[in-house]
Structure formats: C-alpha cells, structure tokens
Image: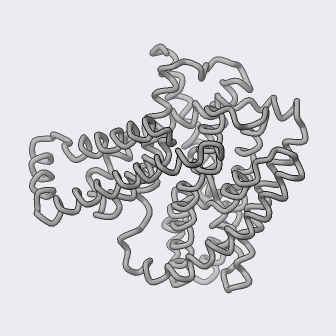
Amino acid sequence: MTFSTLALVIALGLCGPIFALRRSWHLPVILGELVAGIIFGSTGFGVLHTSDPMFTFLADMGFAVVMFVAGAHVPVRDPVVRTALGIGGLRAVIVGLRAVAAGFGIAHWFGTGHGAIYAVLMASSSAALALPIIDSLGMHGRPVLALTAQVAIADTACVVALPLVIDPANAGRAAIGAIAVAAAAAALFLVLRQLELSGTRRRVHRLSEDRSFALELRVSLAALFALCALATQTHVSIMLAGFAAGLAVAGIGEPRRVARQLFAINDGFLGPLFFVWLGARLNLRELGEHPRLIGLGLLLGAGAVLVHLATRAIGQPLPLGALAAAQIGVPVAAVTVGTQLHVLVPGESSALMLGALCTIAAAALAASRIAGTTRADK
C-alpha cells in the first residue's frame, strides 16, 4: 500500500458524510463509504486491491475499533434502561425464534446450507445505527427504553453467536476462544473498575490532560489490541474482541475526552478505511453471474424486518420494530469472517450486504415517520 492509495482511500471516505448530509433521510455515514469502495474496488474500476497485506491489516484495525466503539455505546450502566430489560429481552427472544425459522427456511430454499448464519443475521440489531437515530430524534419514554434494551441484548447475543455458527465444524474451538476473550474482557472491566474506585483513573486523567499525554486513549487501544491478539490466537473473530472491550469500557463509563479521541480515530481514519476496504472487497458482479442471489439478499432484508415487526403482537409500535431491524455490524462481520474462512458461496457475501442495506432503508423510513409524528405532536 502506498501513500497515494491511502490518500485515495481517505478521500473516498468523504463520500460517507456527503451521502448522510441530508438529515431527513437518516442515512448512515458508512453507506457512502461502502458505495465508494464498491465503485473503486473489485466491482468497479479495480483501483483498490484488497489483497494488499498492509491494506488488510489496517482494515482489521479499523474493524476492531468500529466494534469497540459499538460496544462502548451500549448503555449498560443506565439504570433506566435496566428497568426495561425484561420486555426488551422478551422481544429479542421472540425475534430470535422467528429468525431461526425464517433463516433455515431461506437457506433450504436457496440450497446454501447457511440457515444458522441467516438466523443470526435476521435476529441481530445494530446499536451503532439505532441508538444515534434515537438520540437525534430526541425519542424518550418507556417504549424507547424497551427498544434500547432490545437492541443492546440482540446486538450482544448475535455478536457472540456469529463466530459459533459461521464455522460449525470448529464451533467447539470457537466457543473456547469466545470464553477466553469474554474472560479477558471481564478481567479488563474489573481492573478498570478498581482504578475508577481508587481514584487512580481520575488522577491519570488530570495528568494526561495537563501534559497532553493521551494516556487513557493509549491504555484503551493497548487493551483493545491485546484482546484482538488473544482472539486471533484462539481462532476467534476480532469482532468479538472489539465488542467485548467496548462493553468493558461502557461498564465503568467512557471518559468524554477518550470518547472524543476515539471518535477522531474511528470516524476520521480507521472506520472509513475499513468500510471502503469492505466495499472494495465486495464483487457485486457475482450477483449478475448468480442473479438468484439478488433474491437471497432481498429476502434476507425483508425477512429481518418482518421478524422484528412481529413484536407488534406484544405492544411494540411498528416504526420501533423496523428501527430495531437495522443491522450492519453483524452482516459486516459475517462477510469479513466468512470470506476469510471461505465458507460463503460465490456472490453470497454481496447478498448478505444487500440484505443489510434493505434493513437500513427500512430503518430510515421508520425514522422519517417517527420524526414526522414528533413534529406533528409539537
């Protein structure tokens, strides 16, 4: 990878904010980054070569940081959210059960044998997408708290489940690796909590701020990449390592200064680089060679929305159900890990991303409807 390629990748990352510029559409920034990567990667001009080891390593770093930030955004410390865990958990279970039936049905229809993967994808929610939309719309009330709890539970459960279902032959090894990563993340949480209770963290914070040392950021990244190293050694996706590290930090409360610093690293450099790399890696021409997989992608997206709308039967408004269906982290992980392990059939990775884009479109429409209702109420 050269500086000219890196400059191109960062410039292409600007397509994300450009696509998301119109607030009323509620489009995620990553959508423009993916599209830019698709145009300049395997599908389009072929300028970006994702086989480059340095490009791939930087993208892996970006993936880890993206999942770390997603985990850190889960409101595990919010006592108000904890009061809604019961109904949120029930809705996540209902969605999961329906997703299992739908996932295996779709896999049987298309003959891919990946019913468990499809079930996890359709059951998943994205805290990284749903929570910012909730904040931007100023949504509040018990239904929103239940939605937040549902999204957090589903996101966490599916992140843990995906490595186990994507490679069933090595599920035992993956389970042991997942336990090791979870134990390391729990140990990290205990250490961070002790530092917080003893006042050490605050003293380090003041020193770091006075001397511009960025010590908390350095420690956070060191812990994150240490968990990633453990994950790779135990044959577990760095997705789980990043998310677990984020949850550990969320458990003690992420300092605002660190949050701003991570925002700069993630949203300004590594995050866009990863999503441009991912788009460049996708070969949508395979969908033209296997047109029936277009139907697979559309069906996965529609299925994800429908299984989430099923919670209307126990009182969840339809727009909130559609918002809970938004997914990106788990499909991205499925494509990344599935491609690395060579478990996906040709064109299937593109179909998975097409399904994810369908859920994002449904969530954007739901957000627009919620915004319109809020304005009308005012």
Q: Position of residue 28 (x, y in %)?
A: 59, 51
Q: Residue at x 80, y 57 (%)?
A: 104
Q: Does the rendering let one see residue 36?
A: no
Q: Nearer the viewer, residue 107 or 124?
A: 107
Q: Nearer the viewer, residue 6 or 11?
A: 6
Q: Residue at x 47, y 20 (%)?
A: 54
Colour scheme used in the picture?
A: one colour
Q: Quadrant of the C terminus?
A: bottom right
Q: Does the rendering let one see residue 4?
A: yes
Q: Is residue 149 above or below residue 257?
A: below
Lateral position of residue 194 relative to residue 118, left or right: left
Q: Nearer the viewer, residue 83 or 116?
A: 116
Q: Nearer the viewer, residue 204 or 166?
A: 166
Q: Position of residue 70 (x, y in %)?
A: 46, 54
How many numbered dots are placed on residues in this image? 0
Q: Residue at x 35, y 61 (%)?
A: 250
Q: Position of residue 12 (x, y in %)?
A: 56, 30
Please tell me in which quadrant of the rendered image residue 222 appears.
top left
Q: Position of residue 53 (x, y in %)?
A: 51, 19
Q: Is residue 59 above or below residue 160?
A: above
Q: Residue at x 22, y 62 (%)?
A: 193
Q: Is residue 13 above or below residue 17?
A: above
Lateral position of residue 310 relative to residue 372, left or right: right
